[in-house]
Amino acid sequence: MNDELTAALPTVEMRTGGGAAAFLRKTGAIAMKDLRAELRGREVFSTMTMFSVLAVIIFGMAFDLRVPSAEMVAPGVLWVIILFGGVLGLNRSFGAEMDRGTLPALLMAPMDRSAIYFGKVLANFLFTFATGLVILLIMFFVFDVNMLQPLIFLAVALGTLGSVGVGTIFAALTATTRARESMLPILLLPVMVPVFVAGVALTAAVVDGRNLSSAGNWLGILAGFDLVFLVVAYLLFDIILEEV
Amino acid sequence: MATTTIPRKGSRGLDILQLVLGLVAMGAMMAVMWLSLMYAREAANLAGDEQLAQRIFYVHMGCNIGALAGFLMSVVGSIVYLVKRDLDWDRVAQAAIEVGTIFGLGTIFTGMFWAKPTWNTYWTWDPRLTASTITVLIYIAYLLFRQGIDNRRTRATFGSVYAILAFLSVPLTYFSARWFRSIHPVVFGEGNADAQGGFDIIGESMRQTLNFSMIAFCVLFSALLIIRWRLLRMEDELAELREELA
């Protein structure tokens, strides 16, 4: 009887139908939802920015007496704060859905599961990249190092994309585990080492005004990291949400 | 939750395999010690402490092979688990990572003891050293992560997803670290002109020792893997029985 019933109903195509344009629209809808929640609740961007400001000040004090020139530590400080601050925001990405019990509703939305992933990635990217810009601006004043340069903006954008691409899927993995908040950085940071190394090396080359012939290699690592992890995360994300 | 029905009979074959592998591994390890400390001839271009220290290379390389085998096996186990949803493959992945992590730590520590007389430091930011340390940390994180998940199926699925993603970052870590300067000798493949403390594999005795040691460590890896895999099976079986009682 069940078989007859299923046969009689038209197949539901809302999840997958509509092609690329519909997929993009759904991705945008998820991102808009997170942005709107942020505008009303101010949970993610504000805490990340506050953390970043504090971290810049604390690093500044820690290195002030020991390091002859701020240029020597500025690239490392920038990327440490971006990665650590990013973890704060990523924890809220699925943590907030779990706390409010809205994850089942999200899963019932008529869309491909990967649209949820890319929507979350887009929203997290905007939050983290905006935080990155704030860090660069504050470091300009506190460290007196001018990192407001196009190549560094590009590196921060690519690095942030990689960080939230992997971080969003890890946030989904850790959302249901015990000790969620502390587990995410333990999973994320060792995997982010290529981004960290490439980002620091590229930023240091720009700050020192060195020959930028190796910049292509570092941008290549950042872009390759983004591409590999976004594709694999896209393939694996369905499997995670089945279990949540 | 679907119960895993682990066959409780027909393990006689595995018992014998485990025993034979274990005994062979034990004998092979003793042979490796004798070969690398006594049989292999001295390196032509080294003297003093460096001469003595280079003999650790045979164990260092063996551990490295064991770690590599473990981490490759974990990816295979994870992918097959995600396709077939058979918990035996998840146990393969977990056992491989546990054994691989031990070999990975062995690689790092033997390298450090060798590096002190040769490079005059235990630690340096050499790409291979950095990449292997980060890799070991990734897999320790994997083991911690698994412990935090209560549901057996969820633990297997999430662990597999993490194992696959984590493995992808290992080559990227290696290449990103490699573009900083390197002083690690490259014994296989193209040489590193700036390497310090390298030596040529010359003479039959060194090559024989190295080949034997790599095979011996593969046997040791298999023996440990199968023991750990069966132990994990028993743990799951025990958990199931407890659940039935409760």
Image: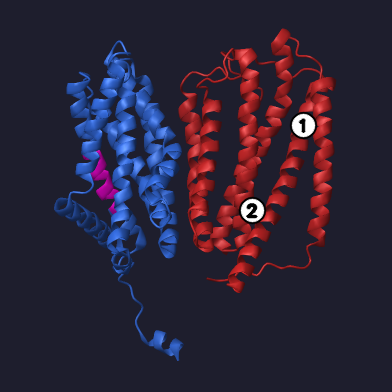
Chain colours: A blue, B red
User: In front here: B103 or A133?
Assistant: B103
Residue A194 pos. (x, y %): 43, 33
User: In front here: A195 or A42?
Assistant: A42
How many numbered marks appear?
2
What is the quadrant of residue B107 in the picture?
Answer: top right
The residue identified by callout 1 is B213
User: In front here: B139 or A220?
Assistant: B139
Residue B189 visible at all: no
Residue B130 part of the magenta-drawn span:
no
Q: Amino acid at mark 1?
A: Ser
Disc 2 or 1, which lies upstream in sequence?
Answer: 2
Q: Amino acid at mark 2?
A: Val
Residue A26 bears which disc, if any?
Answer: none
- Quadrant of image for the C terminus of chain B: bottom right
Q: Chain of mark 2?
A: B
Give me the C-alpha separation between circle 2 and circle 1.
Answer: 24 Å
* Picture layout, residue B105 above or below residue A33: above
Segment colored magenta: A120-130
* Picture layout, residue B153 above or below residue B58: below
* Picture layout, residue A100 above or below residue A123: below
Residue B229 pos. (x, y %): 68, 53
Residue B92 bears which disc, if any?
Answer: 2
Q: Chain of mark 1?
A: B
Residue reaching furthest to the bottom: A1
Query: Under tag 2, what secondary structure?
Result: helix
Q: Main secondary structure of the magenta part?
A: helix
Mark 2 nearby-residue class (10 Å; few <14, some 14–19, many ≥20) = many
> Is B4 positioned to the left or the right of A36 in the image?
right
Which residue corresponds to the image point at 52% horizontal and 31% vertical from the top-left? Answer: B131
> Is A161 positioned to the left or the right of B211 in the image?
left
Residue A125 part of the magenta-drawn span:
yes
